[in-house]
Amino acid sequence: MSDDLSIFDLRTTFGANALDYEFLSRQHLGVASERAIALAGIDRDMAVLDAGCGTGSATIPAALLVGPRGRVVAVDFAPEMLALATEKASYRALLNIEWRLEDMTALKLAPGSFDAVLCVLGIFNVADMPALAASFWRLLRPGGRLVLASTNGRLLDPIYTLFLDAVCDVCGPFVPAQPWLQPHTADQMVAVLARAGIAAARFVEETVISPPLAPEDCWRIIRGTGLDLMLDVESPERARRARAAVKQALHARGVASVATSVLFAVAVKP
């Protein structure tokens, strides 16, 4: 999987697709953020870190929960993502959010300064996951909760498989970067946490199902993941044909909705 990460330019990918990522979050994966917030027990006056905040699907609900005397620090390294997130927060007149354009692997925050740390569908995007988990753990106060969310092996079912099949029909064997497959079981997450010095955690598995989708919606969801941009490693003509094949397959299949399995790890700092 480290090889996958080396060819998956996260900053460029998610920056270029920020609007489609927001659509993906709003139509589908935002439910994972809501669940992470509930598992973190976020309440009034808390200090919360949302690492890899994207377009704010966890940041904004957390800010509403902690209230004006609480605070949320939201970090992302894609300025386009933060621009959308801050616009949504401004619309709600939320003044308790500190936005940081930073890499979450190199945060300059005081140890023991948060009651909850969230990383929703982001930990698998770094090469050294144990180091990242350990850095989050240091930021928690005693009694604070760390909530990490990863996929659980089932992503955007059935359109992810449909995408791969359609592209392979045009381009031949096509194996895109798939960092979300690490870690995708509780045992794998236990190993990550153990190497981070986090001995005890509980796990919750949940399947997120989208509302009814049109073929155009499914295509926007694919774009929101960055899968579409991976076609650009092909020649321009083959990439064009692959995109056309995917869109045709989406219309032919008539996908009603998509499903993603999410694995949550919840650890409480002694």
Image (cartoon, rainbow, N blue to C red):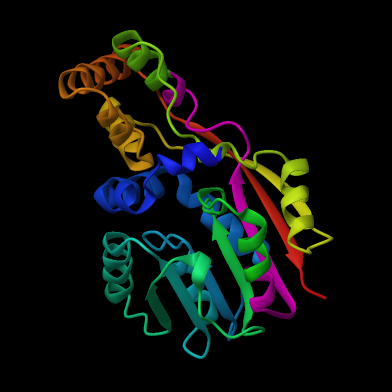
Residue 152, placed above or below residue 140: above
Residue 250, placed above or below residue 210: above
Q: Magenta residues, as a range?
A: 136-161
Residue 137 on the magenta span: yes
Measuring 16% from the left and 24% from the top, which residue is drawn there?
Answer: 236
Front one among 132 and 53: 132
- The total number of labels drawn is 0
Instruction: Say whether residue 216 is visible.
Output: yes
Tell me where residue 207 appears, x and y as whole percent. Answer: 60, 38
Residue 148 on the magenta span: yes
Front one among 60 and 75: 75
Tell me where residue 258 appears, x and y as whole percent. Answer: 46, 30
16 lies left or right of 3? left
162 lies left or right of 65? left
Residue positioned most to the left: 237
Instruction: Say whether residue 41 is visible.
Output: no
Residue 160, placed above or below residue 98: above
Tell me where residue 191 appears, x and y as whole percent. Answer: 77, 48
Q: Give the quarter of the figure containing the C terminus.
A: bottom right
240 lies left or right of 155? left
Measuring 50% from the left and 70% from the top, which residue is drawn there?
Answer: 106
Measuring 66% from the left and 51% from the top, which residue is drawn there?
Answer: 264
Tell me where residue 186 appears, x and y as whole percent. Answer: 75, 43
Picture quadrant where residue 35 is located: bottom right
Q: Give the quarter of the figure containing the N terminus.
A: top right
Front one among 225 and 22: 225
Picture quadrant where residue 47 is located: bottom right
Picture quadrant where residue 76 is located: bottom left
